[in-house]
Structure formats: C-alpha cells, structure tokens
Image (cartoon, rainbow, N blue to C red):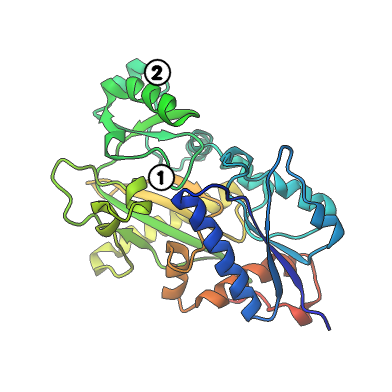
Amino acid sequence: MKPLSIIVLHGASGDDPDERDTRDTAEAIRAALSRQGFDARLAHVSGLPATLPWAVKDRPGLVFNMVEAIDRDMQRAAEVLPLLEEVGIPYTGCSAAAQLAALSKTAQKSLMSRHGLPTPTWPQSGPALAKLGRVIVKSVTEHASLGIDAQSVVSGAHATEEIVSREARFGGRFFAEEYIPGREFNLSLLECREGVKMLPAAEILFQDFTSDAPRIVDYAAKWDETAHSYHHTPRRFTFPDSDNALLDQLADLARRTWQVFGLSGYARVDFRVDEDGRPWILEVNTNPCLAPDAGFAAAAEQAGMGYDALIAHLAALPLAAAEKDPRHVPHPQDC
C-alpha cells in the first residue's frame, strides 16, 4: 500500500539568513518524515494571490505548514490555509483563524490586554510614550527579530523619532512598548491526546554583555555568526528550586494564552520577567521555528521526544482530527 503523501510547504525566497534557515528547516522536516516512511516532498508557495495547483492535482494527505511569509510578506503567511481548508486537505499547526489573529503584534497585545494577560504597555501617542523610561521599538508584523538591534531600546522621549526612522529603513509599521529589563523565557506548548502539554521552559541567558548593552535577542543574536550576541545568548532548561513558583506562573500564563488565541498543534509564548519577578508576555508565535537546533525541538528533546518523533507527532495531530486512515499514520502521543 502506498505511503501517505505529505507536502512540506514553505514560502522562503531570497538569500537572507532567516530565509535560508526556513528552507533548511523544511528539508529537515521532509527528511524526518521520509525516515518515518512517509512520501514527503517540498513545495514552495508564491504569487498574488497564492495558488496551490498541486493541492487539487496531487491531493496530498497532509500539508506540513512551514509558510512564514509569501514573497517575503509575513502578513500573507496564513493566506494558504483557507485554500487548504476549501479543498479539504489537513495541515499542521495552528488554524487559519489563530494565525490571522496573531499576525500583528499590537493586535496580539490588545487581545491579551482584554483578557487580563500581562503584556508591556504600548502607548500610541508621543506624549504617552515620553512618560516611559525606556522602550523597545519593534516591527508590528515581522518576526525572527527582523528590524531589532541594540539601538532599538531608546528613551520614551525618543520613541516616535525611532519609529519613523525604522519604518523608513526597514519598511512596514513599527511600534514601541515598554522595555522590561530582566530575564527572558520561551515557553513551548505541544498539543497531545489529552490536551496541551507544557514543554520544559527555556531561559535565554545574556552572558558577558557590557553594562550599557540591552539584554535582548536581536537580529544579530539569531542570524549573525560574527556578532557577540550570537555566541553569548544560550538557552538553559535547568533552574534552582527558588524559580519553581515563577515557572509555574509562566506555565499558567502560557496555557491561558493558548486558550485565548485558540491555538492548536504547537506554539511558543515569549516572556520577560522584570526585576520584581513579575512576568510579562511579549508575543505569541503560532508557527515557531522547527529547525533541529531551534528552541522548540530543544524543549521537546528535554521532554524525551526526539526530532523525528516530534515531527511525526505534529503530522499525526491533524490527520487524527481529519480521521485519516490510522494504519499509515502514527497516533498522536500522550506525551
């Protein structure tokens, strides 16, 4: 009997480090699925509007969704999902509705605020921004720390000027939120048969930073191998007992965020913890990186789930929901 056909779909184009990383990750996923006996192949989406001719012609059993942007536009990342739903092809990860709700960081923050989830304040007016001590200026829509560097952290009085400067330099819209000095955590969430599971929390360490350097994971920390921050922002998964209450609080907030945003499959919630020990939600990532060396896979490894098992599990979730033939699909794990 023929193995189940899976398309690993991505929209990476160009030769920037983050685009190469997406292509490399898509290939790693394809290889992991092939090792598990699936008929897995890569496909690229582009164009306006996006079209998926193979969706009708070849009718794959599943699309493994790795689309983070289409034609380098992250606002279009969820564009293919309604097309897949229309032709009845299941896909991995969060739903189209959840991804659309999370495309804008300011829209995310508004939703969090309405539901009582703590997120750094983000004044819209210059006078209100000027009242804040320090702010960090970010892109409204771009992820992977695009447009963020050490100069992104400025005084509130200079926030409007920095927003205008970065919009001219990088394009798109930018905003400013209160900068939270302190610790940074990533909490990865994985859907399992019995509900959502919290994978071990990861803390990003800022090692050997100068006293005046902001403790942030900027673009260089993720993508520039020549940068100091690239080599001095490791993650850790082990914590002293004194952090147990904080870790429980982070897990509770991450679960509430999962529910508020209607997430499914897998997701990541990023936090800062201020100097008084209070957590603040920075953002929700509805399609976090699944590279073998990235944070989500590392958290799964800490939970005892190797890379191939993780990828097979993520494929099994939508297939089980769609009631595909279970003889050719691994069951979602209890995990």
Image coordinates for residue 50, horizontal then vertical, percent: 73, 43
Image coordinates for residue 4, horizontal then vertical, percent: 77, 74
Q: Residue at x 61, y 46 (%)?
A: 99
Q: Which mark is residue 96?
A: none
Image coordinates for residue 173, horizontal then vertical, percent: 48, 28
Q: Nearer the viewer, mark 1 or mark 2?
A: 1
Q: Relative to the observer, which residue lies in front, 330 or 245?
A: 330
Query: What SS does tag 2 mark?
Result: loop
Q: Amino acid at mark 1?
A: Ser
- Position of the N terminus by quadrant: bottom right
Q: Relative to the observer, which residue lies in front, 304 or 225?
A: 225
The residue under label 2 is: 125
Q: Residue at x 50, y 55 (%)?
A: 20
The reply, left or right, for residue 328 in relation to residue 156 is right
Q: Amino acid at mark 2?
A: Ser
Query: Which quarter of the picture shows residue 162?
Result: top left
Kindly tell me whether residue 55 is visible in this rendering: yes
Q: Residue at x 37, y 24 (%)?
A: 165
- Position of the C terminus by quadrant: bottom right
Query: Which quarter of the picture shows residue 303?
Result: bottom left
Q: Which mark is residue 145?
A: 1
Return the disc, 1 or 2, that comes first in the chain's sequence. Answer: 2
Q: Residue at x 80, y 71 (%)?
A: 324
Q: Relative to the observer, which residue lies in front, 253 or 215?
A: 215
